Amino acid sequence: MNKFKRLAFLAGFALAGVGAQAQVAVIVNSKNAAASMTADQVASIFLGKSSTLPNGATAAAVDQAESAAVREHFYSKVTGKQAAQVKAAWSRIVFSGKGTPPKEMANSAEVKKFVAANPDAIGYIEKSAVDGSVKVVLTVD
């Protein structure tokens, strides 16, 4: 393989990984009765349009840190919005006194720990971080 072909191959290989994102799992407490949720149901909670889980309980939604790649991936796939657009929408909701945004956690481990300890919690983590302490109700690519 000549030098040019080798460089082109390596560049193509490197770029292939740029677009690849890990799957994101929307999680609830393992004791939650919900077996699954639609993307619309999840989006409604994380956009402040609904505050209840399918079982009628008030949702305790938790977000990833603003700097987390999983946060941007979650919002773009589930809500169709960028994280910055979601933040702006929450600013309007808070200003109008109609709600408070999801509590922010530093990383997936903290989100999982919070959800595992709170029966009405809902959050999202990398699918690879899921274990028996939480239940997956939606997976997004």
Image: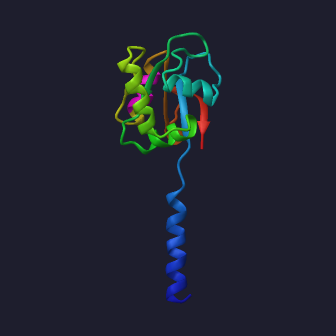
User: Measured along the vertical axis of the image, is residue 94 above or below residue 89?
Assistant: above
Q: Is residue 69 above or below residue 40?
A: below
Residue 9's place in the image compared with 135, above or below, is below
Q: Observer-nearest residue: 65 or 34?
A: 65
| Residue 90 point in image, percent of width and height | 41, 26
Quarter of the image containing the C terminus? Answer: top right
Percent across and percent down for residue 60 are 45, 18
**Region in magenta:** 110-116
Magenta segment, principal secondary structure? Answer: helix
Image quadrant occupied by the N terminus: bottom right
Identity of the residue furthest to the top in this view: 56
Corner quadrant of residue 38: top right
How many numbered marks appear? 0
Percent across and percent down for residue 37 are 63, 25
Point 42% across, 14% down: residue:
98
Image quarter of residue 117: top left
The image quarter in which residue 95 lies? top left
Camera-side residue of 95 and 32: 95
Nearer to the camera, 101 or 27: 101
Horizontal arrangement in the rendering, residue 97 relative to residue 38 (left or right): left
The residue shown at (37%, 26%) is 91
- The structure residue drawn at horizontal position 36% and vertical position 36%, both measured from the top left corner, is 65
